[in-house]
Amino acid sequence: MKQYCKFESALSILVGKWKPVILLQLIANGTMRFSELQKAIPDINKRMLTQQLRELEYHDIVRREVYNQVPPRVEYSISEYGKGLSTVLQALNDWGAAHAQHMEVLYGTDHEENQSGGGGI
Amino acid sequence: MKQYCKFESALSILVGKWKPVILLQLIANGTMRFSELQKAIPDINKRMLTQQLRELEYHDIVRREVYNQVPPRVEYSISEYGKGLSTVLQALNDWGAAHAQHMEVLYGTDHEENQSGGGGI
DNA sequence: CGGTATCCAAAGTGATACTG
DNA sequence: CAGTATCACTTTGGATACCG
């Protein structure tokens, strides 16, 4: 059985405290400026935002477009290739939703992990 | 658009340096004793193995069965519920495999992340 | 055999100040 | 505006010793 040998590397691309929410934002809003992402994700700081975006860019998930003007303008969006993630994200999302239910059944209303105090997408 | 809101929590269950390889082992071999897992994953130590197994157990992915005898015998396996992960794992694996190709095209043979020096599954 | 306890190192994250 | 640099802090992972 040689399947299931690449899912570690797949995971390594999605991990990072802010990558999921960044992807969510870009998926939902299409193209966003750096400052728009900052506003949409209030708890993140520039260092983290930059870092996580760069990692996603390195993997060709996110596209970064720089307009050489002043004040600077940099726009981020999901790359064409990056859109291929949607299947995986959907699978993860579906399972995650079902699992939240399952945990509730097992332990009662006891699923932490809900820092989405801000506005829903 | 309210989809894609649970995939963070899904990810949070799969992360951890050893969870993927533990799941792989249990998927491939069915039921394994603690010591068998240790032998199959030589670089892990007891503390980590125990910890990651407990987290998987908490989420009902892995089943832990204790035989009260001496010497002790504890067996681990993927729970029935945990088998529902296979779809997600497969999706992640497929995308991960394709992505390795993509990275190779972009950057040449330059994809690190291959500590699988040991025996293949 | 199958752990737990303790301590230490490393990686990840955050706050703040500065820059082109 | 969109970063980078530096330092402090927190979380995670590893080594070792001990326990039921």
Image (cartoon, coloured by chain):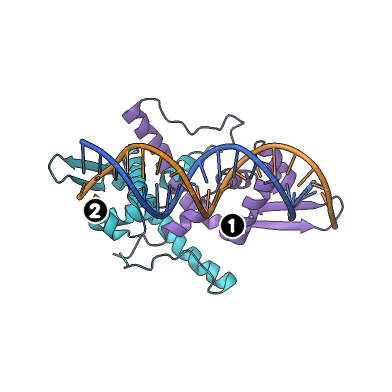
Chain colours: A cyan, B purple, C blue, D orange
Number of numbered discs present? 2
Q: Quadrant of the N terminus of chain A?
A: top right
- In the image, is A92 to the left or to the right of A60? right
- Kindly give the residue lying farthest to the right in the view shown: B70
| Res B96 label | none
Q: Chain of mark 1?
A: B
Q: Is residue C1 left or right of residue B58?
A: right
Q: CA distance from mark 2 to mark 1?
A: 40 Å
At x 46% / y 40%, what residue is drawn?
A: A9
Density class for disc 2 (Cα within 10 Å; few <14, some 14-19, many ≥20) is few
Image marks 2 and 1: residues in contact by CB distance under 8 Å: no
Residue B82: x %, y % from top left: 57, 57
Q: Which residue is mark 1?
A: B61
Which quadrant would residue A105 be assigned to in this image?
bottom right
List x then y, in percent, for residue B117: 58, 29
Q: Secondary structure at mark 2?
A: helix
State the residue in front, A81 or B94: A81
Nearer-the-camera pick, A10 or A20: A20
**Amino acid, disc 1:** Ile
Q: Amino acid at mark 2?
A: Ser
Residue designated by label 2: A35
